[in-house]
Amino acid sequence: MKAVAQGMEKIRKLLGNNAIKITSWLRVPKLNQMIGGSKTSAHCDGYAIDFTCSNFGSIYDICNKISSSDLKYDQLIFEYGNSGWVHISFDPKMRRQDLTILNSSKIYKLGILTREQYEQV
């Protein structure tokens, strides 16, 4: 979890030193199951964090900033919708995998989709 906290500090700096609101970090298996999380979720190992940073910009802006940086991460997920969030994982795999989740269907698409791309899916 220390490495994840250090990664989030890098993200805070990347986002102009703005405050970050963390909405999910470590999840015990029972909680993860109750909220419908993946059985292989990096949250269960403390590697993943869901967050927002409203003083920086939109969820899309945050994802684009992280994706275009040289920051090392395993997975970055952009979620469209009313309860949008950024999911980032610092799992040791460090794949730099960018995904967009289609909120209503829980289908994941590769890349950080623009609004136009999202609406075409």
Image (spheres, rainbow, N blue to C red):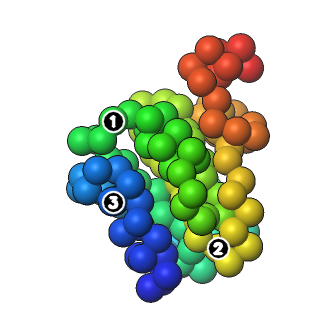
Residues marked 2 and 3 touching at CB (< 8 Å) = no
Q: Position of residue 28 (x, y in %)?
A: 53, 78
Q: Position of residue 112 (x, y in %)?
A: 63, 36
Q: Where is residue 16 in the image (x, y as percent from the top left)?
A: 29, 50
- Which of pointers 1 and 2 lies earlier in the amino acid sequence? 1
Query: How many marks on residues?
Result: 3
- Which of pointers 2 and 3 lies earlier in the amino acid sequence? 3
At 71% from the left edge and 53% from the top edge, which residue is drawn?
A: 97
**Secondary structure under the numbered disc 2 in the rendered image:** loop
Q: In this view, does 74 lie to the left or right of 43?
A: right
Q: In the rendering, which numbered label is found on residue 87?
A: none
Q: Position of residue 22 (x, y in %)?
A: 35, 60
Count residues near mark 1 (Cα–Cα under 10 Å), then give few for <14, some for 14-19, many for 20+. Answer: few
Q: Mark 1 points at which residue?
A: 57
**Secondary structure under the numbered disc 3 in the rendered image:** helix
Q: Mark 2 points at which residue?
A: 91
Q: What residue type is labelled 2?
A: Asp
Distance, label 2 to label 3, CA atoms, is 20 Å
**Residue 39, visible in the rendered structure:** no
Count residues near mark 2 (Cα–Cα under 10 Å), then give few for <14, some for 14-19, many for 20+. Answer: some
Q: Is residue 51 left or right of residue 121?
A: left
Q: Which residue lies furthest to the front in this view?
A: 70
At 25% from the left edge and 56% from the top edge, which residue is drawn?
A: 17
Quadrant (top left, top right, bottom left, bottom right) of the C terminus: top right
At 24% from the left edge and 41% from the top edge, which residue is drawn?
A: 55
